[in-house]
Image (spheres, coloured by chain):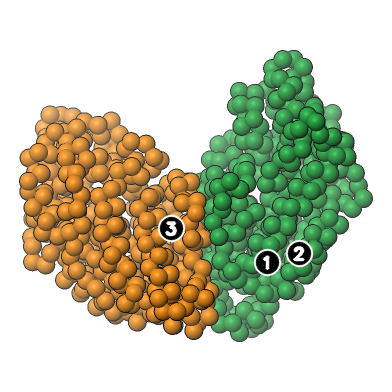
Chain colours: A orange, B green
Amino acid sequence: MSNNTNMVPESYPMNGGDGSNSYTKNSYFQRAGTNAMKAIIDDVIAEKLDVEKQISSSKSTLRIADLGCSVGPNTFIAMQNIIDAVQQKYQSHGFASHMPEFQVFFNDHTSSDFNTLFASLPPERPYFATGVPGSFHGRLFPDFSLDFVHSSFALQWLSKVPEELLNKNSAAWNKGRVHYASAPDEVAQAYTAQFAKDITTFLDGRAKELVVGGLMVLIMPGIPNGIPHSSSATGLMFDFLGHCLMDMAKEGLISEVQVDSFNLPIYVASPKEMTQLVERNGCFSIERMEMTQPWARVDDLSGQACTMHLRAGMEGIISKHFGTEIIDELFDRYCKKHGEIIGLLESKLNEGNQLFIVLKRI
Amino acid sequence: MSNNTNMVPESYPMNGGDGSNSYTKNSYFQRAGTNAMKAIIDDVIAEKLDVEKQISSSKSTLRIADLGCSVGPNTFIAMQNIIDAVQQKYQSHGFASHMPEFQVFFNDHTSSDFNTLFASLPPERPYFATGVPGSFHGRLFPDFSLDFVHSSFALQWLSKVPEELLNKNSAAWNKGRVHYASAPDEVAQAYTAQFAKDITTFLDGRAKELVVGGLMVLIMPGIPNGIPHSSSATGLMFDFLGHCLMDMAKEGLISEVQVDSFNLPIYVASPKEMTQLVERNGCFSIERMEMTQPWARVDDLSGQACTMHLRAGMEGIISKHFGTEIIDELFDRYCKKHGEIIGLLESKLNEGNQLFIVLKRI
């Protein structure tokens, strides 16, 4: 039940607080994703939520968890959307008098800034709020204690960098790169294997925690089936970040060894991969599994905006490895060179870059 | 369900972090109270917890809340004690195979340092941990969602200073004092009335949140029936703190007006008062209501130790009113003059200064 300290997955919290570089102020791409999902989530709840079962179980509380919620405000919008849709379904089915109370569990790594999250909770929220510290790669909740699980832009984070990447004698040694996007197959395979392990423990945990009939909505960066890793929008941005770091190494601002030993623990999965992992787990039916393109709705793909977003999400992990003193320089370079990739980035985003999954505990 | 922002009670968090002035490092008087309570809580659970009912309800999770938990470590010790006692009861009654899972809800004001609390959670805990931000003078949990409520050294905090104390035209204007201990009757009455209101809303909330048969253990500073307010150990310390502030005002370090407008929102209740308030609520049976004297087990009543404890709990509220720059000076004075009250303090502590209450939801 408790985490073994030797096994606590690494955590890379988003920038805390609410300053100009904070995740709070720089997560509107993710928010665009959340908003675009509202209509789909409305549909899913209208179609798939078993209201009769909830009522017949005489439980008066519907428990919802947001796994990897970060520090808001996106998580508040997502939770409100879900509750609105549930209330709508109860009303439209004539069960308004059986309306449940809602308890929302906001989960993220223990090192996430829960103080900021709690301070920014909407004052007039239609739910009881709780925070749950810990990795969703382990157990977080008692058996059968959740009715609905949501996780948005979190499952792409691996619990750790695959070890082979740091081994000079391995074919998966990732010299001169920080990601697998344009790396040799062995590197990509190491990432794929780590992702499979992580999703397996994630699904095992949630299978225990969700009630039978409970729904799980997963939103994450995705790559269409059959497209090479190097062609994802995320891969493109990380490759580009790697180039900026290598430029700095060549100028002697950081060492090449530092770059060689740095790898972003982020994986972008395809629908096919996720389908296989869910089927192998065997506890969930796949209600939806589709690629969407919500970022196409974001107007601002300027260097400034893209850089701020990348920084809000990546500053923590980059500082931890290279020190905080390189951060401004690195993202200045990224921002200035952003024009080189913007055309390509736009076309990738239009191909669809987000995976939307609905699972039901069977 | 949500707090109206106009009604959010004031919060005075204990010193956060884990530095030398932190509550974490300076709450061993409270911890002595918690430890002394272990034997009594063992008894209470052995006698009063209805294991058969829990099992017959086929609920697999036992949910425990610690209200006003502060930042640890006392709350972790208290929760472990309760869970040990519950497990012991299940085992001794032959229900080991029905052992529930435990979910612990750590509650304190939204401004409390949950980041420190979460970071210091025992790694090998036998429960799923969650944090619940908000005032226990409002609702915190869904209906009938808790099996056990614990609150230690928190209910003495009033939700606000009674307004009459700040009104120069009121008989309850508390000029030259920071507490009601040796004040005119009108001041004490204003405190008593505010305390009654606060306990009433507290009991109303918990009556909704606890399952029928659920237990509530309340530990708080107390004063024996029939003893004047001025004679409580707490009253003695706060009077003394008021004298130190008035000395500083006379020397021009702060203004007398500042002292006049400052009042500690802390109340020390008698068993008789609490009995009346519980009976008026009508949703709980009183299983225990007794004065104890756990502080008598604390060896160190030195000026240094007492001052550090007072400072860890009171620095926040005093800084907010007077500014941080007077804090060192104030507590230096308190420490140097502590010898003047130590004899009296010791005798007060021996009379019993802690109220221990067990209620059952009926």
User: Residue flagged by tag 1: what amino acid is it?
Assistant: Ala
Residues indicated by labels 1 and 3 sit on the same polypeptide chain: no
Q: Which chain does the numbered disc 2 sit on? A: B
Q: Nearer the viewer, residue A32 or B30?
A: A32
Marks 1/3: CA–CA distance: 25 Å
Q: Nearer the viewer, residue B348 or A130?
A: A130
Extreme residue toward the right, this view: B226
User: Residue flagged by tag 2: what amino acid is it?
Assistant: Asn
User: Residue flagged by tag 3: what amino acid is it?
Assistant: Phe
Marks 2/1: CA–CA distance: 9 Å
Query: Residue B161, position in %: x, y?
Result: 71, 40
Residue under pointer 1:
B207
Residue under pointer 3:
A106
Query: Looking at the image, is A159 positioned above or below residue B360?
Result: above
Query: Looking at the image, is A3 positioned above or below residue A327?
Result: below
Marks 3/2: CA–CA distance: 33 Å
Residue under pointer 2:
B281
